[in-house]
Amino acid sequence: MISKAFQDIVTQMADVFPKRFGIADAQGLVLASNGPELSSDAADDLIYAIPNNDKIFFKDGYTVKVLTTKPYPEYIVYVEGTDEISKYCCNAVAVSAANVRNYYDEKYDKTIFMQNIIFDNLIALDLHQKARELHVDTDASRAVFYVRVHDKADVSIYEVIRHMFPDKEKDFVINIDRENIVLIKQVRSDSTSKDLEDMAKSILDTVNSETMLTVLVGVSTVAENISGLNNAYKEAQIALEVGKVFDEEKYILNYDNLGIGRLIYQLPIKLCELFLKEVFKKGGIEALDDETILTINKFFENDLNVSETSRQLFVHRNTLVYRLEKIYKLTGLDLRRFDQAIVFKVAMMVHKYLASNPMKI
């Protein structure tokens, strides 16, 4: 237990510092001390006074420092007195306790273990051996949800998602930073793509209702065992990146439904550039104005139907035909021909992909 490791630190340092000190958790429970324990009321008062940082603070004659190894305070170090010796003692105990906590996390924390898997920090042999040590089910089916805050915000969504999935034995919430959270969710082996999208919608709706923030959720396929988690994590990442380029209006992005965007996203940049040069021999997409782009998009939306497109654009049929002729003269592609329309559509997506990152064009 972590409390035993903390008590070892306190016992060793008790001979060095002639002070009463100890370590308590965020609920006010004293885990280790070198003398009479704090009363529950005194401990609660110290916990209640915790600031939003890890700097030393003083409260009711105690010097206190927070250990912030998680997105929220988990432990505090308290030392009786507020003089320089108390401050020095508090810092020394806090450093030692933090080191022990980090070691404990690496060795016993299942969430840290899962984090190492998705970040590819474990080789296959170590992975299964460590899983056995931690009693992690290696054959359970799991999916990865990559949750990203759409806009900059000071509010963390970690607690919201953690409360949605409180079973720490089956579901693991990994805090990458304030705006990016990864959920590894144990699911049924027969879970469908629709089932995963429903879970993602639940996350999106709950975060929005509790924090007023909009999030994007990248959804992986189901990993049949623990060895597939790293690949599932990459799928969720790719779903977000591809969706950011090709499906800007969507907030739930499923790796199973990325369409041709997934193919384009994984093409070499040089190949994409050569493709655009080959397609637009007469002139590139840059030569088309906003009205022409709108006409093209609407024409594609209506399956190359001239009559329906002209109706929705509120223009005469002949006007639309004139615009299509203009596009043909500029690009050499006749959008009324199915094969050339396909080439143009793909070329537009490739151009959008390259334009999504200025370094690519």
Image (cartoon, rainbow, N blue to C red):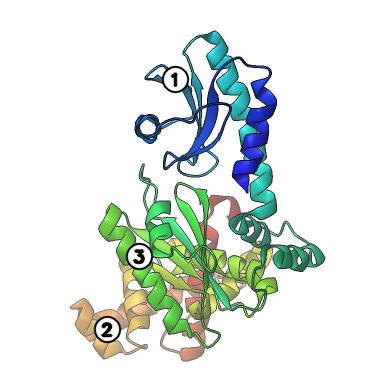
Disc 2 vs disc 3: Cβ atoms closer than 8 Å? no
Give the structural element (helix, strand or loop) at label 1: strand
Disc 2 vs disc 1: Cβ atoms closer than 8 Å? no
Label 1, residues with CA under 10 Å away: few <14, some 14-19, many ≥20:
many
Q: Between tags 2 and 1, which lies in front?
A: 1
Residue at 42%, 43% (x, y): give it: 27
* Mark drawn on residue 62: 1
Gap between marks 1 and 3, in whole Å? 43 Å
**Horizontal placement of 106 versus 36: left or right?**
right
Label 2, residues with CA under 10 Å away: few <14, some 14-19, many ≥20:
many
Residue at 25%, 88% (x, y): give it: 308
Amino acid type assigned to the residue bearing label 3 in the image? Leu
For the residue pair 65 and 199, the one nearer the viewer reads as 65
Q: Between tags 2 and 3, which lies in front?
A: 3
**Quarter of the image holding residue 189?**
bottom right
Residue at 48%, 86% (x, y): give it: 192
- Name the residue beneath numbered marker 3: 204
Looking at the image, is mark 2 or mark 3 earlier in the sequence?
A: 3
Q: Is residue 283 visible?
A: no
Residue 181 pos. (x, y %): 48, 56
- Name the residue beneath numbered marker 2: 309
Amino acid type assigned to the residue bearing label 2 in the image? Thr
Residue farthest to the left? Answer: 314
**Horizontal placement of 95 versus 328: left or right?**
right
